[in-house]
Image (cartoon, coloured by chain):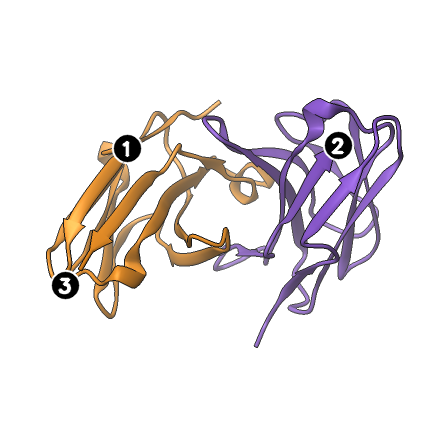
């Protein structure tokens, strides 16, 4: 199956700093999503981004499908950004597109 | 506000019991999924369903079964609970396109004693 590697595994930021999280995957995909899991365990979908670039407020994401990686940018970080960020990918076609394989996540801690 | 609702936030069951975890979505999504999340192992897919009465095995289906009799409801069944099934169970749903974005429920933390 598809392998998903996220880096760094842990990240500590001062409030207001910017950061870049990376997701590498081992095969071509047509489904890629970024999630934030807050300290209470709720997973929130941030982006559906199998290719290209999207922005939502202080967050943006870029996926370069041909080179098999995706980046999540967090600007002007806030303490509420703390939690674990997951990248998840889905395969080529049909039912394989729907089911996601998750990376191990990047644990982000934003300190005041 | 669209939602995926899991019936219990915390559940404690005894070894050997039959356990039902319920998930309901109100978004008319075709796809529904059950994952479990464990420290160090991340999220792993147990089963998913892409239509009523349809089901597909995920990466770790052993010891589990599922039921989808109605589009909005997807149930995970532990036929005979064991201690190694102590975990956080997460339900999700998605449409079939063009945006496959998942919506997750808030999770059920199951402890088997």
Tell me the mark number nearer the camera, choosing from 3 and 2. Answer: 2
> Chain A in the picture: what colour?
orange
Q: Where is mark 3, residue-wise? A: A76
Q: Where is mark 1, residue-wise? A: A9
Q: x%, y% of residue B50?
A: 69, 47
Q: CA distance from mark 3 to mark 2?
A: 42 Å
- State yes or no: discs 3 and 2 in contact (Cβ < 8 Å): no
Quarter of the figure with residue B40: top left
Q: Which mark is residue B71?
A: none
Chain at numbered mark 2:
B
Residue at image point 67% right, 31% down: B86
Q: Which mark is residue B112?
A: 2
Q: Nearer the viewer, residue B47 or A94?
A: B47
Chain at numbered mark 1:
A
Q: x%, y% of residue A64?
A: 23, 42
Q: x%, y% of residue B30?
A: 68, 56
Q: Residues within 10 Å of mark 1 (few under 14, many from 20)?
A: some
Secondary structure at badge 2 equals: strand
Q: Residues within 10 Å of mark 2 (few under 14, many from 20)?
A: some
First in residue order: circle 1 vs circle 3: 1
Left or right of residue B41: residue B9: right
> Chain B in the picture: what colour?
purple
Q: Are marks 3 and 2 on the same chain?
A: no
Chain at numbered mark 3:
A
């Amino acid at each position: 199956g598809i392998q998903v590697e996220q880096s760094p595994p842990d990240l500590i930021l001062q409030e207001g700093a910017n950061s870049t999280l990376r997701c590498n995957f081992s095969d071509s995909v047509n489904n890629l999503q970024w999630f934030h899991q807050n300290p209470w365990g709720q997973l929130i979908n941030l982006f559906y981004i199998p290719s290209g670039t999207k922005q939502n407020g202080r967050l943006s994401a870029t996926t370069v499908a041909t080179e098999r990686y995706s980046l999540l940018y967090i600007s002007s970080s806030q303490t509420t950004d703390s939690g674990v960020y997951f990248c998840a990918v889905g395969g080529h076609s049909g039912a394989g597109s729907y089911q996601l394989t998750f990376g191990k996540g990047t644990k982000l801690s934003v300190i005041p | 506000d669209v939602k995926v609702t899991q019936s219990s936030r915390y559940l404690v069951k005894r070894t050997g019991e039959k356990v039902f975890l319920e998930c309901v979505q109100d978004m008319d999504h075709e796809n529904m999924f059950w994952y479990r999340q464990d420290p160090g192992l991340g999220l792993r897919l147990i089963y998913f369903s892409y239509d009523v009465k349809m089901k597909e095995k995920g990466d770790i289906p052993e010891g589990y079964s599922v039921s989808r009799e109605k589009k909005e409801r997807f149930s995970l069944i532990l036929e005979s609970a064991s201690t190694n099934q102590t975990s956080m169970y997460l339900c999700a749903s998605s449409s079939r396109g063009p945006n496959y974005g998942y919506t997750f429920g808030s999770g059920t933390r199951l402890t088997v004693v």
